[in-house]
Amino acid sequence: MEAVAEPGNLAGVRHIILVLSGKGGVGKSTISTELALALRHAGKKVGILDVDLCGPSVPRMLQAQGCAVHQCDNGWVPVFVDQEQSIALMSVGFLLETPDEAVVWRGPKKNALIRQFVSDVVWGELDFLVVDTPPGTSDEHISAVEALRPYQPLGAVLVTTPQAVSVGDVRRELTFCRKTGLPVIGIVENMSGFVCPHCAVRRPAVRLRASGPPACEEPGRGPGLHPGVPQECCLPCTCLHCPEDPGWGTGAGADRH
């Protein structure tokens, strides 16, 4: 029998999306931030819950470092990162004395804080809550999924890069989602290539891709990791110079870009 959500601080949240990755450094927090900004641009009210306890980078990405978290009668009040208060953010980064302070905690303490973040942050009315999780399939992920399960999350967005090691790890993340009953919304292959601002040509960032030919050569195709994944997409980077530009490698062409 599925758990039933009790009325609480998540009662006003319509949709919950978890952002997962099997490996660190693939741009998971960047995708979480960009997803929140895109939803805000679409007129939605968005919250970001940063439960990457050992690497809380979302406050820096949203230029919210140094902000203080306040308490009210119902719990913690998240930090609003814009004047319109359309993006609310909660992160362990707001609870550290300095940005360089390390979170040296064992699993039970981490799991307790994740459950507290889920239950004690006063989000108010939100269209979407984006949950930025740490990499892997560890205790923290199980705690997050179990704590959010009563609120019926919309699903998970998985982030990978083209390298074989990263693609292999994200396949394990797919297995995690299947075992925990978490629907997969789609997979993002980040840094799949780069687009030159001078000639607008897309070039592969990795010559030997684990997922076959460059997925973005065919519209609508992604990494092809799993036939049951409904949406897969590739996100390129933008380079500063073009090898076809005479100033490539010297910086001489930089003023023209």
Image: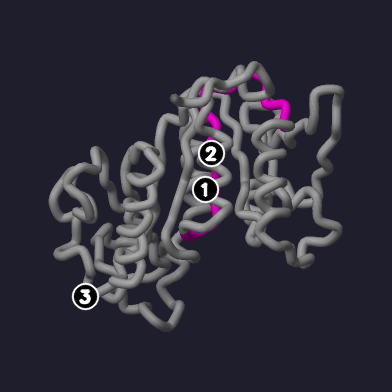
In the image: residue 184, left or right of residue 75: left
Give percent across and percent down for residue 195: 31, 60
The dot on residue 146 is 2
Q: Which residues are magenta?
A: 121-136
Residue at far bottom of view: 250
Quarter of the image containing the C terminus? bottom left
Mark 1: amino acid: Ile
Question: Residue tagged by mark 1?
Answer: 142
Is residue 197 visible from the viewing direction of this image? no
Mark 3: amino acid: Leu
User: What residue is drawn where x is 25% and y is 68%?
Assistant: 204
Question: Residue tagged by mark 3?
Answer: 208
Give percent across and percent down for residue 188: 34, 50
Mark 2: amino acid: Glu
Give percent across and percent down for residue 24: 49, 65
User: What residue is drawn where x is 46% and y is 31%?
Assistant: 153
Mark 3, Cα crowd under 10 Å, few <14 / some 14-19 / many 20+, is: few
Mark 3 → mark 1, Cα distance in angstroms: 33 Å
Residue at far front of view: 1
